[in-house]
Image (cartoon, grey):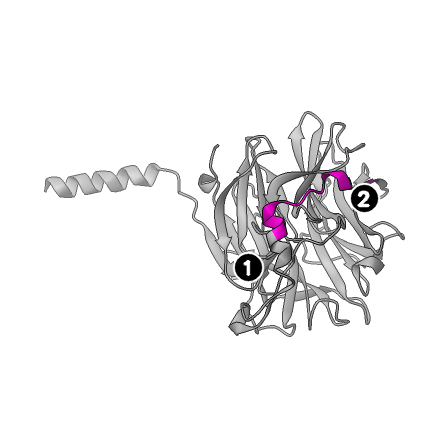
Amino acid sequence: MRLRHLLSAAVLVASFLPAIAQGVSEFIFQPGSTSFPESHASTIVELKDHTLMAAWFGGTREGANDVAIWGAVRNASGWSKPVELAREPNTPCWNPVLFHTKDGVLWLYYKYGKAPAEWAAARMSSNDEGKTWSKIEKLPAGLIGPVRAKPLILADGTIVAGSSIESAAGWAAWIERSTDNGKTWAKIGPITVPDSLDLPSAESKAAQALGNVAKGEGVNGADEKLYPPPSTNIGIIQPAIVDMGKKHLRLYARSHSQASRIAVADSIDNGVTWTQARYIDLPNPSSGIDAVRLNDGRIVLIYNHSYNRRSPINLAVSTDGEHFRMFKVLEQGPSQYSYPAMIVDSNGDLQITYTWHRLTIRYMKVPASEIPKN
């Protein structure tokens, strides 16, 4: 009898405790279930009703003329069937980015062109959270908008977007900044890493020596593409921007360099001017990254903790934005888990998407309780 009373009391107490957030890991769609065999470069946004929307590019293969922008929405029933959001005639699409401006409009920016060196950009907007979209608007020549990672929206509504250029002359990051919800833009840069700072480590030298292919280590024993450090400093691209407080912004960028590490640059005037970039200690195998600032000021990075492989995919946390502790391996193994997108939702949890073997997009939720405090 006493045991029954104790159990009843425990159930009563538990009913008043807050629910513990649970992690989630699932595919947005099953591999092979869509008309497009390959998918890559996802983006994610929380909608006003707290559901999620994701988008990515999909087609026969990256750079094929049939590559379009696809999207899906997640609610209590799971992910909707992917729908086509944008397509360019006989031209591949690339790198969609979803975000809200301060006026509540939902935007989708994307790139199109035969290759990154030839990219132009386009965008659409929605006033009903993606149920319907405006006509496609082509951006002026030279304007890319957020090139891969979501932009930072400041408290006054200013958009600070990480942009970049890949050309035969090398790679360079830029900032595209708008104070009128994207009607007009100022382009700031280029932001590069001086060659004098591009110092290879023992780890990056070893990765360079392995070459570009790991024989038989990919999916089903296929060769796996490697991304070793180059012999010269190619540059940095695809910045992800966080607000460090007191008008201090920091960008974290993908690098293709001898150092093979993540690069950072800083602004102390809310993104009007920027320092040149430098490297921090985290490796980067020339692969996309993303970053967020938590409500208490900690910075979380999602990236590939490797000098030459897009696997594993990891989370790292920092209290100062400079020194990071890798605390979670989201996935690992042969092939690639890459090009992540990450946001902090209205509950303070991490919402994440990333490329899974180029065959589908993986979605994950990581509760705030799983992120170390120090």
Toward the viewer: 278 or 2? 278
Magenta-drawn stretch contains 203: yes
Residue 31: x percent and y percent?
Answer: 55, 70
Residue 80: x percent and y percent?
Answer: 57, 63
Q: Residue furthest left?
A: 1
Task: Determine the image quadrant of residue 201.
Answer: top right
Front of the two marks 1 and 2: 1
Q: Sort mark 1 into few (<14), some (14-19) or many (20+) by Cα contacts within 10 Å.
A: many
Q: Is residue 19 visible?
A: yes
Magenta-tinted stretch: 189-205
Q: Secondary structure at mark 2?
A: loop
Label 1 is placed on what type of residue?
Arg
Q: Is residue 45 visible?
A: no
Residue 182, numbered circle = 2
Task: Determine the image quadrant of residue 16.
Answer: top left
Magenta-drawn stretch contains 113: no
Residue 160, numbered circle = none
Q: Sort mark 2 into few (<14), some (14-19) or many (20+) by Cα contacts within 10 Å.
A: some
Does residue 216 lie above or below 135 as drawn?
Answer: below
Label 2 is placed on what type of residue?
Gly
At x 64%, y 65%, the residue is 39
Residue 52: x percent and y percent?
Answer: 58, 52
At x 73%, y 66%, the residue is 68
Residue 362, numbered circle = 1
At x 89%, y 52%, the residue is 140
